[in-house]
Each structure stands twice: as C-alpha cells, then as structure tokens.
Image: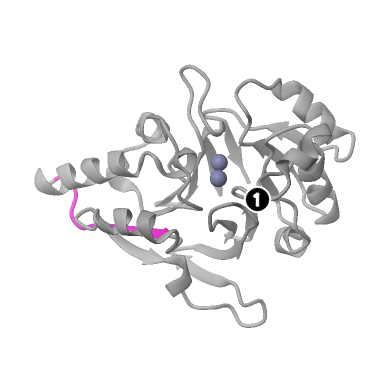
Amino acid sequence: MRVTILGCWGPYPRAGENCSGYLLQEGDTSIMLDAGHGTFSCLSELMDFRKLTAVIISHFHPDHSADIPCLRHAIKGANADGTRSGRLPLYAPEKPEEDYARLRAQEDAFVITGVEQLPVQSGTGYHKLQVKDFAITFLPTVHPLPCYACRITATGKTVVYTADTSWFDELVPFAQDADLLIAECSGFDKDRDKLAGVHLSARQAANLAKAANVKGLVLTHFWPEFDVNRLVAEAAEVYDNVSAAAGKRVIDL
Ligand SMILES: [Zn+2]
Ligand SMILES: [Zn+2]
C-alpha cells in the first residue's frame, strides 16, 4: 500500500502548503482520505483526479473537507466532457445535519453514503467499508464535531488514521499492531489541558503508538506556527520510530 501525504496542517495551512489529506493507493485503487484546503491541487499534481476510486471524509471541519466542492466541479466537468463517467463514491459522517445537507446538495458529482449507514462489523460494532482491496473500519472519536478515525487494511498492511481526536482509551485497541499510525498532534504536552476534548498532544500521540505496539508513527495536523521538529522530539521521548508528515511525502508499506 502506498500512502501519500497531501497536507498536514490544521486548522489553516502554512504558505504554499495544505491542510489535511491523504492518498491511499494499491494497484488501480486510489482513495482520498480527507480533503482539506489545498489538497485537491496537491492530488492533481500526483495523479489524474478522474482515476480516484472513492473519497472518505473524517469530519466536516473545513481543514478536512474544504476542497470537496473543487472535486465536485472537476468530476462534473469530466463527466460532461466525456473524460470520465459516473459519480464518485464519497463517505462522510451524517452529522452535523446542516453540513451533511450541504454535502448532499453535491450529489450531481458524488454517490454519498453516511458512515452510519454502512454495515457494522460483528464483535467491534464499528461501521465497515470495502473499497476494492481496501477494508476500512470507522471509530467515532472525541472531538467537537462527529468524527471518525479509520483503520485501513490492504494486501496484509494496516494504516490507522486518528483523524481529529482527544485521547480516549479505545484508540489503543483500534490502532493495535498497525504497520503505520498517522496520528494528529495539535500541540505540546504542556498544553494538554487546552487540547482536552479536541486534540492530542505530541506525547499523547506517542503514548498511543507505544501502547498499541504499532510499527511506525507519523505525526500530522500541526498548528502552522509550531516548530514541527520540537513536536517530533517530544514524541520521540516516548516512542522511537516517529517522523513528521509533510506535503507529498510518500510512505510505501
Ligand atoms: Zn482538523
Ligand atoms: Zn476537527
């Protein structure tokens, strides 16, 4: 499986860079996971958007969803000029209702399914999705908007993406033994109280990686004013195999 970072900043990007987005690829299958500010432009540098297989949106904060309308117009245009046919499958939370209604107004480009409408995995109760070789399960996170972390498996490799979340214990079994954990890291541990209920600190992301016994940790979702090297250093005090997300960084598993 190939993971390409489309953007790693939240809630606004650094100059010339992008907010949250990740491209997951295996064979002919390409899934766009989150579509924050600037990610459509980055995706278009890397591949023909017409060849996307599906889009998954973790939640409706703009740094994860702002570029959906770009993709809508691109898909509509491609369908109209005959360079593509059919609407693109898109999966997103059904709440908040007003955001979901705005998304549903874009059904001329997308076949939209609420994550809550997906079948449930026996045993865990998590909603699950199969897109070609990709098996994906969704864990509701702790965040001001309904949001889902994703556990993605293809050809024997597993990536876990925390999306936006505060610490809660269920993250640990959800991320257990993953080959790669992409964890949000919105600040330093000294600000843990300010982050509570919304985001993880670098140290908490590392605690998750260690407790879940993952093989590697990539930190992401950085506040643009913070020193990313210092965030990585804080995480490295807890967990060794840690690095920072960066636009267009490619990780092959
Ligand atoms: Zn965010
Ligand atoms: Zn958010």
Q: Nearer the viewer, residue 100 or 232?
A: 100
The answer to which quarter of the image holds residue 96 is: bottom left
The residue that appears at 78% across and 61% down in the rendered structure is 169
The residue stretch that appears in magenta: 83-91
Residue behind mark 1: 165
Left or right: 14 as drawn, with respect to 210? left
- Image quarter for ligand 2 equals top right
Mark 1 packing: few (<14 Cα in 10 Å), some, or many (20+)? many
Which residue sits furthest bottom?
A: 122
Going by the picture, which residue comes out furthest to the right?
Answer: 237
Which of 11 and 37 lies nearest the eye of the viewer?
A: 11
Residue 103 occupies quadrant = bottom left
Picture coordinates of residue 161, whole percent (x, y): 62, 50
Name the element at disc 1.
Answer: loop
**Count of numbered badges drawn on the protein:** 1
Quarter-wise, where is residue 112 in the image? bottom left
Whole-percent x and y of residue 219?
A: 69, 37
